[in-house]
Amino acid sequence: MRLPYSELRNRREIIAWALYDWGNSAFATVIIAGFFPVFLKQYWAADTDVTISSFRLGLANSVASLLVLSIAPVLGAIADQGTFKKSFLMSFAAVGIIATGALFFVSSGQWPLAIVLYVIGGVGFASANIFYDALLIDVTQKRHLDAVSALGFALGYLGGGLFLAFCAYLTLRPETFGLDSSTHAVRVSFLLVALWWAIFTMPLWRYVREHRGKAATTLKAASILGIRQLRDTFRAVRRYRQIIIFLAAYWLYIDGVDTIVRMAVDYGVALGFTSQHLIFALLVTQFVGFPAAIAFGWIGQRLSAKTGILIGLVVYVGVTLWAYKLDQVWEFYAIAVTIGLVQGGVQSLSRSLYARIIPENSSAEFFGFYNLLGKFAAVIGPALMGGMAYWTHSTRVSILSLLVLFAGGAILLLFVDDKAPQSEP
């Protein structure tokens, strides 16, 4: 798949937009998936039972998600009333960047402060993504949504993977960089993530032009109109049948996707794999995800975004069945590669398909709903797995319950007409 640059007059805007994903993915890989959970147990809460620290981390994630859930649709509706998407993105990114960098200064044993900064950083990261997604419509035409969305996810996988690899090397060889210990290297990594995120936010601020909203020219006027708009959208939701069907499908299958992401490390630990194997598998997924997301953009352009998502869901069904019988290290790596092949594609094509069927002048508001459902992801899956494990007394059997999510999402997606125009609320 190649971006049709000859047809695009705003190539610089597209690259600048996609580079934000390259930059902020360092937070997702290094902070969320990598260093923070381990450092919380081994440094900030070293004298605390691991089950208690796990509970605190889980609670922190829940609080961050609930905060984003409470503000996402409202802020999205406000942003649609004027040219506020970029401003909101920059404000929340700044909050996340400052909180991430501040983790460097948190001393051993200060787990409450670390948790608070982690929550603030997570809220900034997730909230900024609402407006980043909404700007997709501003930087490209509808016929190029799949390719441009895929470019963003692809650069996110590559940037996040490269930065995770660098930070992992930094902690393994701290003396090479003049650092006195791995602990010092991890703390420096927090500063570097903040710097990386900030640097690659600048091109978006400098070059991406936001289309003017509906009416408001001041934030106060936009707030009044946005809240009124959100109320009207809830009342008129029956007019958006295709959007409702898609969001229901997305809720199911993205829950399955996120559940697999979140349970992979624990599942590997339960099978006796070492931490080195798990880190390497995470890196494999990131680097495979880069070209795969680009390839899925090509599939979306040639066959349709819906077809590409359905292909990815069929692969996830196969992965789930394979994971049921998994018992060798090479199989764990093979599954990591397979997930990398489809994970970014399902995510990027879901975003571009959704952008295609929502009202253009309400993009931030509707992406607020989209990200809201994304934040509810990995709620149904763990409950299904827990219930199945209780009844069958088998962790392996419990993973098969995810088939319900992938199959249910795929069936609903079949009823989505991705060419149906949507009227304004």
Image (spheres, helix red, strand yellow):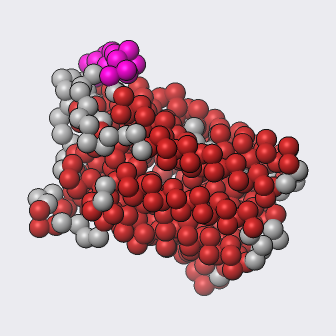
Give x and y (percent) for residue 50. Answer: 84, 53
- In this orientation, which residue lies closer to the viewer: 378 or 49? 378
Above or below: residue 259 compared with residue 228: below
Residue 258 percent coordinates (x, y): 59, 51
Residue 139 appearing in the image: yes
Count the labels in the image: 0
In the displayed structure, 191 sits above or below 227; it is below
Residue 177 drawn at (x, y percent): 58, 80
Magenta segment: 221-239
Is 107 on the left-hand or right-hand side of 285? right
Name the quarter where the N terminus is drawn: bottom left
The residue lying at 49 percent from left, 44 percent from top is 411
How would you classify the magenta stretch by its main secondary structure? helix
| 357 displayed left or right of 198 | left
Residue 37, above or below 3: above
| Residue 271 lies in the magenta stretch | no
Q: Quadrant of residue 20?
A: bottom left
Q: Residue at x 21, y 23 (%)?
A: 216
Front position in the image: 360 or 80: 360
- Per the image, is 223 magenta? yes
Q: Which quadrant does the C terminus fall into?
A: top left
Residue 25 visible to the viewer: no
Q: Is residue 399 left or right of residue 415?
A: right
The residue nearer to you, when weighing 101 against 35, is 35
